[in-house]
Amino acid sequence: MAVSSADEYHSARWPQFGSEGVGAPYIRRLIDFLNARLHMADHRALLLLKSMMVSELPSDLHASATEAVLGFRYSMLEAGNDLMTLWAESHQVTAGVAEYLAGQLFPDRIFSNDGRSGARHQRAAHAQLTIWLSDRFRFGFSEWLSSTYLAYDLAALALLVDHAADESLVERAKMVMDIALLDVALHSFHGRFAPSMGRAHVEQIMSPESAEIIPIWQAAFGQTPQLDVEKLTSLFITAERYQVPAAIRELATELPVRRVLSTHGLDATEVRDELRRHPFHPRSQSLDLVRFWWGQQAVTTPETIVDSARAMRIFGLQDSRILAPMRPYLRMPSLMLLSTLRTLNPITSGKALN
């Protein structure tokens, strides 16, 4: 199959308000989702920010959208009892990009959830995104070869590349996008990406043709996907500043017999030492370790239980509906946590994306 060069590749454009599904009902649905802080509301935040940045919304809708963006919770460091799992690896980047762009869009406004200015939110998100990108470049993805979560990562990074003012951050994001798409290309067969994977939605494993990665595969490797602005992947399809390297596109569409050897992420037991000796972002504080561990779902493993309980107290997550099963551990002295975990041996003990 012939593959056009990067210069010949053109993406679709994000629809203007009033066309192709981006109307008042669409914007209101996104606003309601943010205000309710439902699971995956950070995805809707990205779609809402995209619409605000490229379209001129009616004044009443723009005011409501602005209020929703300013009142949203963007990090597990912020207070809030809701259904968002902002600590997972994919959500760290989707929420981080949302926070960065929201802060960039409203630098002088106060964000009501924590009282910080948009400029402070942007700086905090910049720091966390820089570390997240560096960790993916150095260690790979804990949610390895996921037909669901790689798609979400790529969509969020495409939005960052299109709209971030910091060119250094943009270049880092592009490099990680290249790495992710190289993985997709190397593990594709006849237009399908269906390898073993670290984490994915069950229905997308059973029916690969429904996977979130499909429209990204099509857009990245020379086909024309259908644009659906309800899906996060629409942000990749409409990306304007990122171009897939031609060599990666060729790998995806040629079908030689090949053996691919790769490594993804870290074992939970490796995290402490690897982060301590990271050449660019060395970390040893408990909260930094927890951010990486929880990104790989290692919340109640023997290596993480003490730090996880400490983080829940510090972050004020005792009332989190998602983390409710952790509450009994919070009443125990730290010295008893590990022995109790080993004695009870709950089903979640040892659960991690290794």
Image (cartoon, rainbow, N blue to C red):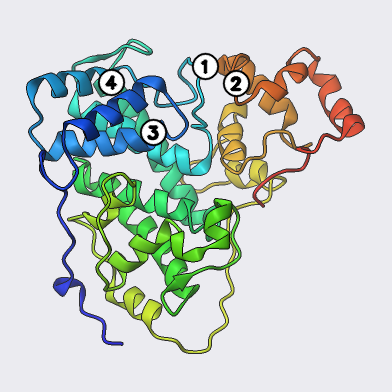
Q: Is residue 126 visible?
A: no
Alpha carbon separation for disc pair 4 and 1:
17 Å
Under tag 2, what secondary structure? loop
What is the C-alpha distance between the residues marked 2 and 4?
A: 22 Å
Q: Give the residue displayed 41% in from the left and 49% down from the top.
A: 152
Q: Nearer the viewer, residue 298 or 136?
A: 298
Amino acid type at image mark 3: Asp
Name the residue carrying label 3: 42
Q: Which mark is residue 321?
A: 2
| Residue with the mark numbered 4 | 68
> Whole-Å distance between the Cαs marked 3 and 2?
17 Å
Identified by mark 2, the residue type is: Arg
Q: Nearer the viewer, residue 278 or 7?
A: 7
Distance, label 2 to label 1, CA atoms, is 7 Å
Q: Are marks 2 and 4 in contact (CB under 8 Å)?
A: no
Residue wearing tag 1: 81
**Residue 210: percent from the left, percent from the top?**
45, 60
Confirm or deny contact between disc 4 and disc 1 (CB under 8 A). no
Q: Which of the two discs, 2 and 1, labels the residue nearer the N terminus?
A: 1
Q: Earlier in the sequence, mark 1 or mark 3?
A: 3
Horizontal relation, residue 22 to residue 99: left or right: left
10 Å crowding of disc 1: few (<14), some (14-19), many (20+): some
